[in-house]
Amino acid sequence: MSFPRDPRSRPFSLRPLTRRRFVAGSLAGLALTACGGGSSRSADGSLLTPEPMPEPIPQPEPIPDTEVPGPMMPRGLHSSLVGDSHTSRTITWFTDGEDAPVSWLEFSSFDDDADEFAIQHDPFEFSVEASSSQTTGIESFTHRASADGIDPDRPLRYRVGSDEGGWSAVYVIQPSPRDEWSFIHFGDHGVGELAQLVTAEVMRTPSDLLMLAGDLSYANGDQQIWDEWFEQMQPLLARRITMAAPGNHEQKDFGGDTFKNRFSHPPKPLTSSFGANDPGSTFYSFDFNRVHFLVTTAGALIGDGTLPEELLNIEVDLANAAFRRLRGEIDFIIVMQHFTIWTDQLDRSPANFTLVALEENIFLRYGVDLVIVGHDHIYQRSAPMFLGLPNPLGYVQMMVGTGGASIRLLDNDGTQIWSESSFVGIGFAHYKVSKGKIKIDYIGAPPLDMSDAGREYSEGVFEVLDSAEISAKSLLACSQCAMPARGPDVLLKNFEAIAAHTHDRNRRALRHCG
């Protein structure tokens, strides 16, 4: 149970066919009533020219000498959203040992002109007791606590820990802007040198939200690699709101239980109105200003038996979002998942025709604007598309599996008709959101060369390599997308085939990764 606590009640201490024809043929004829879409081109129809990459704005480092050493030091701090994106922040962290210390999140808002000494040493105004649970597969504990009712217009300073176990450094999270803001997206990360190059560049690129599209640590069952990943990522994740989707490599960590244990997310859409406590949700949704995000597994964790429930959640959530967009409450609907819908990575394909067909059917029905994915270790941006063909009524897929796990090649057949831009290397997508528009920049760095050995390295010289713009749908298009949610008789009619194809796709995906 969480409750306010007066920090002054104890001593205060602060120191430191062909595959394409077959798939396209399998999907043909499945389209439902479509709605009009935005555009990934400029207003006159011409392709947008990438702008020069702006000089990164340095962000403050955490304050190391505010750390208070102890026998059970907090580690792996990361921030996320479980409640409102302006007035709530959730912090998750880990401690080692056979017992869990009673741990706390201490926090205060402060003014922009506060001096460094005040940020470091002023007493915290609020303190909330954290929940604790055994960390999956390792002798550690996972702790999570939420700072609710915070001042939406002022930065938040916080630390976590206990007098018994030790205290983290003091970290600062900036308030969420309301009018113009940005988020970063990539997937397929890991702990190697390429991944660390991407992390460093992301840290130099300001954003208000970080969206991770699965295959995060590549622990593949070794929980110490998860600890290493969180240690490397803590300087970034402790001060930038981060939301994640599970990938096929997360399935290798106790069927996805590690992902559910180590992250804190909103509850499932169908149960959120009833206040269900599901901190490790693998499919969930949230709003950030006028953008609605839906995060799905795309069957990555099909072994846990929740895919039928998830499909019903996706349908209801997107139907509600489409009605809310028609009422003028939001401008965009974005879906994030690990698996691609379409791809041109060498030796890959959608490979899961029944699930892809159903997802595209749902996306078109409710007018999804963007589908942001990973899985394939290349960058590829689509035109607005449906059924693997350019379609102004369709969604734009941003495939950014370039987080640094490895660098793959494009298909020898070249890119398909839906593809507008592609790149082989490492990098991430940066989305700048304003009223009715999303400006997209892909920021990447090439490998040393295209040989198998050369693709294991990069000099890390990042620049803007691709740009596009998505416009909000028209009122007429929004009205066509506001359709009632369908039930299991429609969505699960072909579930036996969906499950079989998904199991097969997941097995082949893991074999492809070695």
Image (spheres, rainbow, N blue to C red):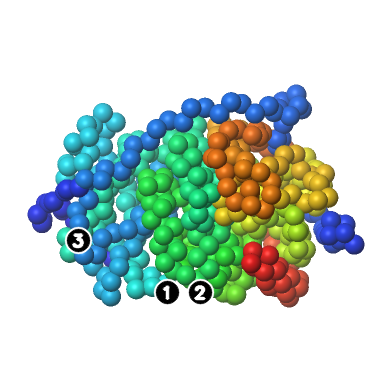
Name the quarter where the N terminus is drawn: bottom left
Callout 1 touching callout 2 (CB < 8 Å) = yes
Name which quarter of the figure residue 72 lies in: bottom left
Coordinates of residue 465 in the picture (x, y in percent): 64, 34
Name the quarter where the C terminus is drawn: bottom right
Coordinates of residue 495 in the picture (x, y in percent): 72, 72
The answer for how far apart the CA atoms under marks 1 and 2 are is 8 Å
Q: Which mark is residue 137?
A: 1
Q: Which mark is residue 70?
A: 3
Coordinates of residue 296 in the picture (x, y in percent): 59, 59
Q: Secondary structure at mark 2?
A: helix
Q: Name the residue type under label 2.
A: Phe
Q: Residue at x 28, y 71 (%)?
A: 97
Q: Earlier in the sequence, mark 3 or mark 1?
A: 3
Q: Earlier in the sequence, mark 1 or mark 2?
A: 1
Q: Earlier in the sequence, mark 2 or mark 3?
A: 3
The answer for how far apart the CA atoms under marks 3 and 1 are is 24 Å
In the image, residue 262 above or below residue 475: below
Q: Secondary structure at mark 1?
A: loop
Q: Name the residue type under label 1.
A: Gly
Camera sees residue 201? yes
In the image, residue 300 above or below residue 203: below
Q: Which residue is mark 2?
A: 254
Q: Residue at x 72, y 39 (%)?
A: 421
Q: Secondary structure at mark 3?
A: loop
Q: Name the residue type under label 3.
A: Gly
Q: Farthest right residue?
A: 17
Q: Residue at x 55, y 46 (%)?
A: 185
| Between 246 and 287, the one nearer to me in the picture | 246
The answer for how far apart the CA atoms under marks 2 and 3 are is 31 Å
